[in-house]
Every structure is written in C-alpha cells, then in structure tokens.
Image (cartoon, rainbow, N blue to C red):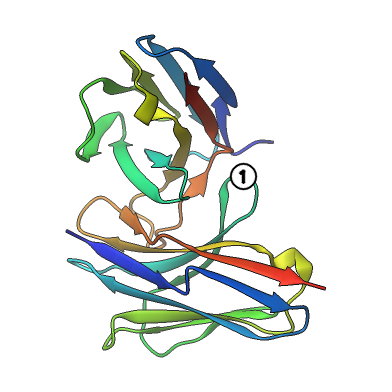
Amino acid sequence: DTAVSQTPKYLVTQMGNDKSIKCEQNLGHDTMYWYKQDSKKFLKIMFSYNNKELIINETVPNRFSPKSPDKAHLNLHINSLELGDSAVYFCASSQLDRPSGEQYFGPGTRLTVT
Amino acid sequence: EDKVVQSPLSLVVHEGDTVTLNCSYEVTNFRSLLWYKQEKKAPTFLFMLTSSGIEKKSGRLSSILDKKELSSILNITATQTGDSAIYLCAVEGGTASKLTFGTGTRLQVTL
C-alpha cells in the first residue's frame, strides 16, 4: 500500500494556466507538507497543515493556495503559472506529537511550465 | 533564517571506498537532525539524531551529531554503486516540525 501518494506524477502546462496537484496519505498522520525542489535539487518547504489547520506558510507567492479537506489530504492549487514554477513538488506527512521528526515523502510531481 | 549547509556538494569515489559527508546548521530551537537519501524519486529516511555524541548505525551507514559544533557527519563504509544518490541533511527546528534542508551531497560510486 502506498503511504503518501500524489497525482499527477507529471504535469506539463503553459504559462498562465491554473493547475492542481493532489496528495493523500494513509499513515494516519496529522500533519502534511508541501515542498518544492528546484533544478539544483534544493528542497524547500512551502506549507504545512496540522489537522486541517495551516501551521507553516513560508514566503510563497499567493498564486499558490493549499487546501486540506481532511487530515489525510492536502492539495496544492497554483494560479497563473509562471516559468519559474517549474520544479518537482513533494508532499510529505508526519505525526506532529511524535518525538521523531521523520517525514514520509510522496513520489513527487514534476511540473513543467512552457 | 534557519540554514543548513552540506559539504562536499558532490563526490565521486570507487566502490569499496569510505566516504564522510558533512552537515552544519544554524537553526532556532533545534529539535533533531535527519539524513535522507534521494535516488530518482522521493527522499527516503535514513537517520534521526537528537542527542550529541550518540552514533546511529544501519549496516554500512552511520551518523553522529555534535551539538556543540552544530554539525553532523554521515559515514558510508565499503561503498557500493547502489549508494549513488543525493544525501540530504535536514534540521527540525522552530515550531511545527519545520524541516530545513541542505542543498545535498551528490555521491557517485563507480566500479
């Protein structure tokens, strides 16, 4: 069984379009995250939700809007896509009150904006 | 701003060599330091370190944290081609389990 899944795996779209990426975890975790990994492989946190509440919101353009319908799902909607949005987007989950900070990552969504 | 720096940025070794990867950090309210291995897809968890001076070991991989020096090393002995990957160091700090990642060390193990 897949622990953290994302759809789609690949997304190619044109500048100006709006797109969504979905994430689901079946680990029973209470916290989910979105990370962006650029072409140099630098992984940077964007958002985190704990029990559907936003708890981390890094400096991200407001074209990016996360939505958590329940604690097993965290979706990412991106408006007016730009070339610089091309990257791999990783979803992750963890249990916040556990001593371990271990986060489980999804397989990633490679977004290419042309 | 929290910062994690890894060195070297990349490394090419021969199978059987031993390598040491470095990670140093500046982070508020340090909670833990984690090592991940990233091959083609998602990062996979290797170790979590919270206490200084205690070595974590898993097979040929081991890691140790030095809280005084704000650093950690990841050792891989008798490297194999399957060890080729990007090794990411991340530090958990601040509130809400925020992980700050380093830029990674790209390790290539050749025959």
- For image coordinates 54% across by 36% down, the residue present is A108
- For image coordinates 44% across by 43% down, the residue present is A37
Q: Residues within 10 Å of mark 1 (few under 14, many from 20)?
A: some
Residue A5: x percent and y percent?
57, 31
Residue B102: x percent and y percent?
38, 62
Residue B101 in the image: above or below residue A55: below
The subunit letter for the residue under badge 1 reads: B
Asked if residue A8 can be seen in this view, the reply is no
In the orientation shown, which residue stands out farthest toward the right? B111
Quarter of the figure with residue A69: top left
Asked if residue A63 can be seen in this view, the reply is yes
Which quadrant holds the N terminus of chain A? Answer: top right
In the orientation shown, which residue stands out farthest toward the top? A17
Label 1 sits on what residue type?
Answer: Lys
Q: How many marks?
A: 1
Q: Nearer the viewer, residue A100 or B41?
A: B41
- State left or right for residue A72 relative to residue B39: left
Residue B55 in the image: above or below residue A71: below
Residue A100: x percent and y percent?
42, 62
- State left or right for residue B28 relative to residue A31: left
Residue A44 in the image: above or below residue A16: below
Q: Nearer the viewer, residue A51 or A46?
A: A46
- State left or right for residue B64 relative to residue B62: left
Quarter of the figure with residue B27: bottom left
Report which residue position mark 1 lands on: B41
- State left or right for residue B27 relative to residue B44: left
